[in-house]
Image: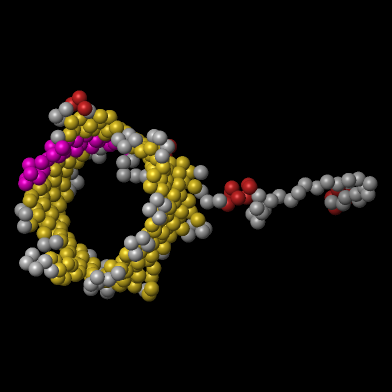
Amino acid sequence: MAESELGLKSPPNPNSLIVSAPPATTGDGFGPAVWLRQRPKIRVTTEFDSDTAVFFHRISCKVLDSFAKLKFSFHNNGKGELSDPQLALTSKYLSLHYDIEEKNALVNASFDVAPGVQFKAIHEVKSQQGELAMVADLAGPAYKLELSSAVPSIGMPRATLKFPLGEVSVEEKEEEEEEDVQVKRILSVNGILRGQILNGVCTAKYKDEALDLRYCFKDEQMTFIPSISLPSNAMSFAFKRQFGPSDKLSYWYNLDTNYWSTVYKHNMGKDFKFKAGYDSEVRLGWASLWVGEEDGKAKTAPMKMKVQFMLQVPQDDIKSSAMMFRVKKRWDI
């Protein structure tokens, strides 16, 4: 009894053969099981559109201890022919996109050179063109000044001032004179301003000597958006009515062309949406059913798969109506 309590053991028999099991493989080993546990997760996404009868495949995974993402994508048709292969390596500070068929690469870099100062660069290898930009905070992150220039440089850099109510940019542009067909460089000013007026938001956008004015009034049930473009005086308005948490009707009308369109939406939970509409410009009526959140990712959809069925009915030729569908499926390996 005492021998058992003290944990004493009898000496081994010198004539016996003792075979011990090999030690368990630790995380420092290089066996297949260890590699499978340590390899990055691979995401495979496949999309198919019956209108074009073309598959789109994308394979991606995180590399360098999740510092960057590696992505390979390509298309293939019903005959199995591959096209448009693309290879991309993206990270927080540097991105590289390589077109295998064109043998062309696009490099995009962005990093902080000082507190509140950011440097950006874009370079296309084949054309030897790109852009350099410097962004600096002014009186806090809400106010920014950006200076950007094309590479190779063809004039003064473009200056853009961003502030809470919009942004204004000044740049040089080429303008041809009709008489002697000479090209001269002029300063061009573009900008966008937003402001609260009554219960809505007014937006003024000025670009290429054209001014677009837009007012958006919105409450819990209704949205009304009139807009006008100057100097063309083209006017349009949009009207949206929310009948409940699941039903919404939208209407758009262009006073200049008399074209109009309407869309009705009905949500059946989070993962099912029915839409139907008509477009007078192309004289086409349509209806579609979404299985999976329309604007969401396949990751959040049931079985990680999104499906859209659409029926198109031309007004002038009902017999040529067509049923189409799109499928997006994701696998995590």
Magenta-colored stretch includes residue 125: no
Q: Residue 240 in the image: x percent, y percent?
A: 16, 43
325, above or below 232, in the image? above
Q: Nearer the viewer, residue 138 or 197?
A: 138
Figure label count: 0
Residue farthest front in this picture = 180
Is the image coloured rainbow, by chain, by secondary structure, or in one colour?
secondary structure
6 sits to left or right of 159: right
Which residue corresponds to the image point at 38% horizontal and 65% vertical from the top-left?
Answer: 109
Residue 238 vertical placement versus 178 (above, below): above
Overall secondary structure of the magenta stretch? Answer: strand
> What is the x, y in percent for residue 219?
17, 48
Q: Residue at x 7, y 44 (%)?
A: 257
Q: Nearer the viewer, residue 276 or 326?
A: 326
Bounds of the magenta segment: 253-282
Residue 205 visible to an observer of this rendering: yes
Percent across and percent down for residue 182 are 13, 69
Residue 195, picture quadrant = bottom left
Based on the displayed image, in which of its 4 quarters is residue 261 positioned?
A: top left
Q: Residue at x 34, y 35 (%)?
A: 53
Judge whether 75 appears above or below 276 on screen. Answer: below
**Image: 279 above or below 148:** above
Residue positioned most to the right:
15
Q: Is residue 268 visible?
A: no
For residue 255: magenta? yes
x then y, percent, for residue 70: 46, 54
Query: In percent of the image, x 31 and y 71: which residue is there?
Result: 134
